[in-house]
């Protein structure tokens, strides 16, 4: 339909397009969601949606997430709070670089074009963002402070560089953190992840493992249980002992972590991770035959990922290193093997193998004919006889002086002896590993370190920040295993800030999770060139009161944000240790039971839905579809129904005939009761994230309003205006365009978002009468309206004198009458 023949809005016509066009420029001028006004006396509230990646225009998932976050933000604004609800873009990363390579473009141009498109769509979607608080992580004014953060960590000893076997994506040609490997595949491209030895930068998140785990207890009831459980499992604290095993011909003992020191007497061999430094050291000192076998096996292991290596049903393989370790509790010589089921980054990269009581050790021992010795009597058949290891608890056997002890006592006693002999100590281990932040790609934050032949690692001086990315002109961005920044010779080659000789910049860029680990703090002063964030503003606004986003970030982003917050707290920049006080996870938007994808042909274009049904209808549908955490199947919901309801609510406001400011007290009691019942119930529903029930309550009130207008109450009754104004205010949380137009129809100036809902008048909700039931032999025979304070005698007489009750009793004798005033009379006969 062209602009020339589009229908014009009339006073009595609900024209979605005209309403949208009318109010957006008004809001731009009114700016109801500004949060930076000096001297604003309202209490502060910080509501934040997880910021988007600018991969294209907004999609259906964005529509859900921002509709739900907007309900929360608008609710607190309406409650009289100064709400900070900012927005930004997580704009660095592989997708932009890969898209640029594919199209032959600069990733910056592709990224910023998408940001402009998303920003326009967000404004159209009527998100209640404070547009003065906007950030883009690929802007130098932002990533300058990523580099500041890195140097703060470096100076505190929390950023370090080491050579290790890292997760490597052959397709993306970059390293991946453990958290970015999903079922053995790269989370971005689904390529099988392998291992590669590289010198990389890490953040020492393991120094904070205990606090990250223990402080989850403070988030109970405020974060989803599922997220807390996922974080606890990922950190994975286990208690046990470090046991020192001497290696024949080696000066230093090897420390092995075990959660079961009580089974030490059952250790019959040692297994070392083939890709560990220890394995390489021992193999280097072995015979040519052993060394060749080890190297061939290591090449084979490198082709497998950790998920495959740890699979319990994987056939056991390994190579003997022809060396022996000494068991510290009995002096036995234990043959040392390398096997792929032991990982280099678990514990110390070596295990004591107790085949009688561990399935993988048992399978390995059976494969290579190694001894199996039971040392825990669980009451089950000996594993040598049954062919099945016994993994349960029991009493120690074949364990010398410790025979007869139970598990707990044996662990304690054996650990005590090891400690006294200097051969071990009580300790704990974590599944969590240090955060690998190096990336061999262009589109990211340059690491602010200069490598000097004389001085080693030299931090870039603060007055030389930001280290800005060089132009892509002349750079080959195609993935090849080394950073494209290495090709920018004018950029790489610099003088050492300390000694002045020729040096080189670090050519890796930071993991984009660094960008998002602290962005919530940058919103406090997104344009500042002086500080990352003002400490006083952080005290006033942070932590975030309500965070909204998908459960896909339950481990990666949330864990890193918690870690960075704790470090900044320890550096005296923050007075809190948890970044997000409350967390709401929204579900996915599906189509016909499946996630939307081009390959399935089930993509629903958000722009088409907005054009067809209107923005408010889509927003309302997202909120009404079900609990926020549940998935929404777009095939099962009805934006058409939402549009019809909105038109009905709008027409009701249009039909009101009383003037603004009228005294509601003289209005119809029943309609006022309906309005104040709504006012009593609505707030707790929104604060409890029961948005769908809140919408249903609005619908009920609209029904009562319509009934009042069309019935004996009449459109001029003050109660009709009270109900209509209440609907407009409540509806502004879900359908801001329609609500604003209703507000105007009701004779008010623009700004329904700032119009507070009235407090419920509970005196209107006190019941003066109730419906009582009379039963005869368990069957309802009559109902009658009675006073709420009716006595038992009066209610009994009323029931016994009822014609319907008399008829039901007939000639039978009354055996008993039970009265529960004011609701029930139960008559039994015989």
Image (spheres, grey):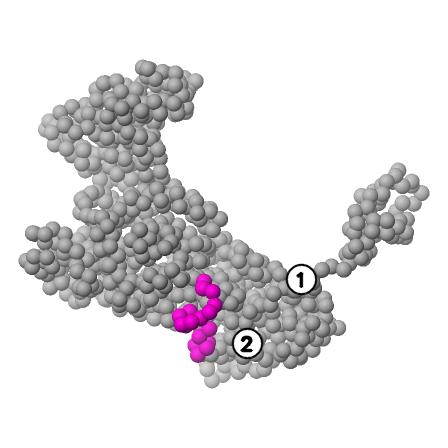
Residue wearing tag 2: 741
Magenta segment: does it hold 345? no
> Would you say 509 lies left or right of 561 here?
left
Furthest residue in direction left, as rendered = 501
Gap in angstroms between the C-alphas marked 2 and 1? 30 Å
Give the quadrant of residue 426.
Answer: top left
Residue located at (69% from left, 63% from top): 763
> Would you say 572 lies left or right of 37 here?
left
> Would you say 12 lies left or right of 363 here?
right
Residue situated in front as seen by the camera: 637 or 254: 254
Instruction: Give the crowd class for mark 2: few <14, some 14-19, many >=20 residues within 10 Å.
Output: many
Residue wearing tag 1: 762
Pointer 2 or 1: first along the chain: 2
Range of magenta residues: 27-45
Q: Is residue 46 above or below residue 716?
A: above
> Would you say 122 lies left or right of 258 here?
right
Q: Is residue 800 above or below residue 471?
A: above
């Amino acid at each position: 339909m062209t602009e020339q023949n589009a229908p014009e809005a009339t006073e009595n016509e609900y024209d979605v397009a005209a309403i949208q066009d009318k109010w957006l420029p008004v809001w731009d001028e009114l700016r109801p969601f500004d949060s930076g006004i000096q001297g604003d006396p309202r209490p502060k509230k910080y509501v934040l949606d997880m910021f988007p990646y600018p991969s294209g225009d907004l999609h259906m998932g964005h529509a859900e997430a921002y509709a739900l976050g907007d309900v929360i933000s608008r609710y607190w604004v309406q409650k009289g709070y100064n709400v900070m609800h900012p927005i930004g873009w997580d704009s660095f990363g592989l997708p932009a670089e890969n898209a640029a390579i594919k199209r032959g473009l600069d990733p910056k141009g592709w990224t910023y074009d998408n940001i402009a498109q998303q920003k326009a769509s967000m404004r159209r979607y009527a998100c209640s963002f404070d547009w003065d608080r906007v950030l883009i992580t690929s802007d130098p004014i932002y990533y300058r402070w990523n580099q500041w953060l890195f140097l703060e960590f470096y100076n505190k000893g929390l950023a370090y560089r080491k050579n290790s076997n890292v997760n490597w994506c052959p397709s993306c040609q970059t390293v991946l953190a453990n958290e970015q490997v999903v079922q053995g595949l790269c989370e971005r491209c689904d390529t099988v992840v392998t291992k590669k030895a590289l010198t990389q930068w890490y953040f020492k998140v393991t120094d904070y493992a205990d606090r990250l785990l223990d402080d989850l207890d403070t988030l109970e009831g405020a974060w989803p249980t599922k997220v807390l459980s996922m974080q606890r499992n990922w950190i994975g604290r286990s208690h046990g002992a470090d046991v020192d095993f001497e290696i024949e011909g080696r000066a230093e003992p090897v420390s092995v972590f075990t959660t079961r020191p009580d089974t030490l007497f059952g250790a019959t061999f040692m297994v070392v991770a083939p890709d560990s430094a220890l394995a390489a050291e021992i193999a280097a000192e072995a015979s040519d035959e052993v060394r060749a076998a080890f190297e061939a096996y290591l090449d084979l292991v490198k082709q497998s990922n950790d998920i495959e290596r740890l699979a319990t049903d994987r056939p056991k393989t390994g190579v003997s290193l022809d060396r022996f370790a000494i068991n510290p509790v009995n002096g036995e010589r234990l043959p040392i093997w390398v096997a792929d089921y032991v990982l280099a980054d678990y514990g110390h990269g070596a295990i004591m193998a107790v085949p009688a009581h561990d399935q993988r050790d048992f399978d390995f021992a059976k494969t290579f004919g190694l001894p199996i010795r039971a040392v825990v009597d669980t009451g089950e058949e000996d594993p040598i006889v049954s062919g099945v290891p016994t993994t349960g608890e029991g009493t120690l056997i074949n364990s010398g002086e410790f025979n007869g002890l139970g598990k707990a006592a044996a662990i304690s006693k054996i650990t005590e002896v090891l400690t006294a002999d200097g051969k071990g100590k009580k300790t704990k281990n974590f599944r969590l590993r240090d955060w690998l932040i190096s990336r061999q790609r262009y589109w990211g934050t340059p690491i602010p370190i200069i490598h000097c032949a004389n001085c080693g690692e030299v931090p870039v001086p603060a007055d030389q920040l930001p280290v800005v990315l060089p132009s892509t002109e002349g750079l080959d961005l195609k993935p090849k295993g080394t950073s494209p920044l290495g090709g920018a010779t004018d950029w790489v080659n610099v003088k050492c800030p300390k000694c002045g000789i020729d040096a080189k910049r670090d050519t890796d860029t930071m993991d984009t999770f660094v960008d998002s680990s602290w962005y919530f703090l940058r919103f406090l002063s997104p344009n500042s060139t002086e500080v990352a964030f003002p400490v006083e503003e952080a005290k006033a606004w942070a932590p975030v009161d309500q965070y909204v986003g998908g459960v896909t970030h339950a481990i990666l982003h949330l864990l890193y944000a918690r870690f960075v917050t704790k470090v900044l707290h320890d550096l005296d920049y923050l007075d809190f240790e948890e970044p997000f006080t409350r967390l709401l996870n929204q579900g996915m938007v599906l189509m016909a039971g499946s996630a939307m994808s081009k390959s399935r042909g089930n993509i629903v274009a958000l722009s088409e839905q907005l054009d067809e049904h209107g923005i408010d209808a889509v927003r309302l549908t997202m909120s009404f579809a079900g609990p926020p955490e549940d998935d929404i199947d777009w095939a099962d919901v009805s934006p058409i129904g939402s549009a019809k309801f909105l038109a009905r609510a709008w027409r009701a406001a249009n039909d009101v005939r009383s003037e603004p400011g009228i005294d509601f007290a003289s209005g119809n009691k029943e309609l006022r009761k309906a309005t104040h019942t709504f006012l009593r119930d609505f707030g707790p529903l929104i604060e409890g994230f029961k948005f769908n029930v809140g919408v249903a309550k609005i619908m009920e009130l609209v029904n009562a309003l319509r009934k009042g207008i069309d019935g004996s109450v009449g459109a001029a009754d003050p109660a009709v205006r009270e109900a209509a104004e209440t609907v407009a205010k409540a509806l502004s949380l879900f359908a801001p365009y329609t609500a604003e137009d209703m507000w105007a129809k009701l004779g008010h100036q623009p700004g329904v978002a700032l119009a507070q809902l009235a407090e419920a008048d509970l005196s209107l909700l006190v019941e003066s009468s109730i419906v009582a039931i009379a039963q005869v032999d368990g069957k309802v025979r009559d109902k009658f309206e009675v006073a709420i304070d009716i006595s038992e005698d009066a209610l009994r007489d009323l029931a016994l004198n009822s014609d319907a009750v008399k008829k039901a009793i007939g000639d039978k004798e009354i055996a008993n009458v039970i009265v529960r005033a004011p609701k029930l009379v139960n008559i039994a006969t015989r």
